[in-house]
Amino acid sequence: MNLSLSMIVKNEERFLPECLESVKGLVDEIVIVDTGSTDSTKQIAASFGARVFDFAWCDDFSAARNESLKNTTGDWVLYLDADERVDKTYHGKIRRMISGGKADAFLLNLKSKIGTKEDSQYHLVSYPRLFKKMKGVAFVGEVHEQITTSLNAVRARIVQSDVIIEHLGYAQDDDVILEKARRNYRLLLSQIERRENYGYALYQLGQTEIVLSEVEKGLAHLHEALAVGGFGKSVEASIYGIIAENTFKRGDYNAALSACEKSLHAAPQQTFAHMMKGEIYLKLCEYQESENSFSKSLDQYRSSILLGKVATAVEPVFDIDVLYSKLGKAASLAGDTETAKLYLGKAVEEKPSELKVANYMEFFLKHKMYREALDAAEQYRQFENEDWYLRLVSSALIDLEHFQDASRLLENISEHDRVSLSSLANCRLKIGDFEGAESAFQSAVESGYNDPQGMELYGLVQFKLGKFSDAVKTLTRVVEIDPMNSRVAKFIQAGRAQIGAATVAIK
């Protein structure tokens, strides 16, 4: 079986070499249609042995795709964009797929990272990117062009695979993504005017408008797409998922829940709608329901996403550590401490970060599991110089009455706040360092600290050091906050007596 690579390109010198390198040894021919490059794209293509054809751009992606498809000579066609790669570990599998005689087309999973942040969300989308070259099979749609429509028309046997194509096109700055959305918006309007592939075009238009911050218009077009139909259950599930996410963002939790249920009805094996329900129930303070939803999301993630299976047209996916964190948080709020401990720990193990380590330690502190908090701190010593780490470890040490060790850590904090300063003052007080305690209390007060109990201790430390005038001033502030504090009133009286005695002695 001969396999042809079919592509359309324009000014892709940045991406094209790695794309063509990724299919070296897999495909038998490379057919590239160039729509007007002014850089070295065509020369790069030729260096890989590609047959290159020029095509005048006419604002129609399908027209360009079909020109490339027309020039292929293989029994099977794989189509890619320049910003996509096929890992070489899939080469043997793809060859076996096309020679197996069990399908006319295969759904490959396009994995697209969104944005440039390290923890950015990514999407998995199943497309029939690999298909037999058959009469009547061609692309339709000016933008977001589809081969599925014609494959269905010729009753092609379409089979899901676990092959993943890495897509780099959305792992770019927001302005690049917005520029693509604006281009697609213009082409979609033209396609909708002709009512070509109408329901699917409305779906893409709604998505694009949401990207362009036209959320109300986008939601309206998504609802219209659902009314028109003409697409499969996977697209229907994706539409309801987008509606759920965006109604959730504006605080309409009932509408978001309803959309999640409809999405799950269309595609029960998906991950996203369960995760979205978990987020909604968190906002509604229904923590057990939230835990249940995140647990179902994780189960589906393991049985689908991790195996390269996609249940919806566009499956928004987070790395598994994100799901671990969400499940751990919900379980903690639901009072399920064992589940919370398990998954908060798994989240940190999977991908340690400041936030996840802090959440893990705070969980132990909240449940008075101080030794476990210190064990977690010891395990992630790479953060030991960070202020948040020092605060959390010292908190555990204070609760275990290890005041000397806590004081030492608190002294290493680079940017104190009134809480850490008051903790430092209390630790110094516990170990008998009254001058150090006074200094820390003074800094805390200068930072806005006015807790009555802490201020009382501050005044008593000043009294202990013989600074009676300062003590009276500090303790007077305590009485102003808590007029019924008779103990403080007695110390104020005693302090004034000492001041008076000292004045008499001087005279």
Image (spheres, rainbow, N blue to C red):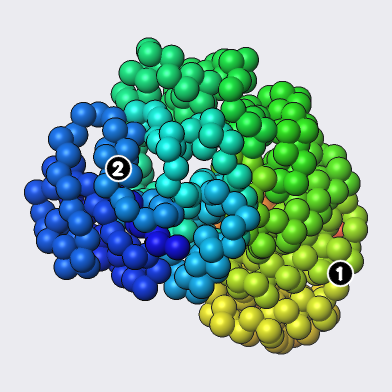
**Left or right of residue 317: residue 17:** left
Task: Name the quadrant of the N terminus.
Answer: bottom left
Give me the residue at 54% from left, 80% from top.
385
Q: Nearer the viewer, mark 2 or mark 1?
A: 2
Sooner in the amino-acid sequence: mark 2 or mark 1: 2
The Cα–Cα distance between marks 2 and 1, rounded to whole angstroms, is 70 Å
Q: Position of residue 273 (x, y in %)?
A: 71, 40
The residue lying toward the viewer, choosing from 248 and 112, is: 112
Q: Return the mark for residue 301.
A: none
The residue carrying pointer 2 sits among few (fewer than 14), some (14 to 19) or many (20 or more) residues within 10 Å by Cα, namely few
Give me the residue at 67% from left, 62% from top.
307
Residue 20 visible, this angle: yes
Secondary structure under the numbered disc 2 in the rendered image: helix
Q: Position of residue 20 (x, y in %)?
A: 30, 65
Q: Position of residue 470 (x, y in %)?
A: 62, 63
Residue 358 visible, this angle: no
The residue carrying pointer 1 sits among few (fewer than 14), some (14 to 19) or many (20 or more) residues within 10 Å by Cα, namely some
In this rendering, the answer to whether 173 lies above or below 209 is below
The residue lying toward the viewer, choosing from 3 and 8, is: 3
In this rendering, the answer to whether 452 lies above or below 409 is above
Three-letter residue code for mark 1: Lys
Q: In this figure, which residue is indicated by the disc labeled 1?
A: 368
Give me the residue at 9% from left, 49% from top.
38
**Left or right of residue 225: residue 343:** right
The residue lying toward the viewer, choosing from 161 and 386, is: 161
In the picture as drawn, the residue positioned furthest to the left comes out as: 38
Q: In this figure, which residue is indicated by the disc labeled 2?
A: 70
